[in-house]
Amino acid sequence: MTDSPITRMFAWWNQAFVAHGFTTETFAEHFTDDADFIVDGGLRATGPEAIAAHFGRIRAKCDAVELVVPPVATLSDETQGFVQYRCTFSSEGKAGSEVCMAHAFYRNGKIARYEVISRAEQA
């Protein structure tokens, strides 16, 4: 897996979901103070506190969520990165998965903007 702010965040995220580790402080290790988190064209959160709250709400609704690593593909340099990946989840006994494409801008080794589009994966 290519080392980049995105792939480091993915590795941490999966562990944090299981350990209830979604805090402002832990998201601040991966996202800048003004980072926008955009999903399917809609701004979901800005900054680590709001991003932690966003994922806290998801965690409260889901029994399990995993960003599958290694990602399908990554392309990254010091300023930006692209990633194609799968996300699996279960909630109330039902399982599903999505295919996702994301683009991120980096600043000082952290994610300054993360934009993802996702679609339900066909069985």
Image (spheres, helix red, strand yellow):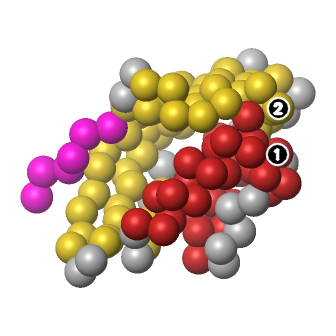
Please indicate whether residue 92 sits to the left or right of residue 41 in the image.
left
In front: 2, or 52? 52
Q: Is residue 107 left or right of residue 8?
A: right
Query: Do the residues under discs 2 and 1 have CB atoms within 8 angstroms?
Result: yes
Classify mark 2: helix, strand or loop: strand
Mark 1 lies on residue: 28
**Dividing the image into 4 quarters, which one contains the C terminus?**
bottom left
Q: Quadrant of residue 91?
A: bottom left
Q: Which residue is mark 2?
A: 33
Magenta-span inclusion, residue 73? no
Q: Amino acid at mark 2?
A: Asp
Which of disc 1 and disc 2 is earlier in sequence?
A: 1
Estimate the x, y position of residue 68 in percent, counting from the top left. Answer: 45, 59
Instruction: Specify the amino acid type for callout 1.
Output: Ala
- Tell me which residue sits at (60%, 34%) in the image: 45
| Residue 121 belongs to the span the image colors magenta | yes
Residues in magenta? 118-123
User: What secondary structure is marked by label 1?
Assistant: helix
Is 17 left or right of 24, judged from the image as shown?
Answer: left
Q: Write the residue at 24% across / 70% down.
A: 95
Residue drawn at the location 43% of the way across and 25% of the way down: 42
Task: Specify few, some or many for label 1: CA neighbours under 10 Å numbering under 14, 14-19, or 20 or more.
Answer: some
| Above/below status of 46 relative to 96 | above
Query: Is residue 51 shown above or below 59?
Result: above
Q: Residue at x 43, y 38 (%)?
A: 84
Query: Residue 55: horizontal and vertical position, in percent?
Result: 56, 54
Q: Is residue 6 visible?
A: yes
Q: Is residue 105 above or below residue 59?
A: above
Q: Classify residue 101 by image quadrant.
A: top left
Q: Residue 4, how many percent across, how many down?
A: 71, 39
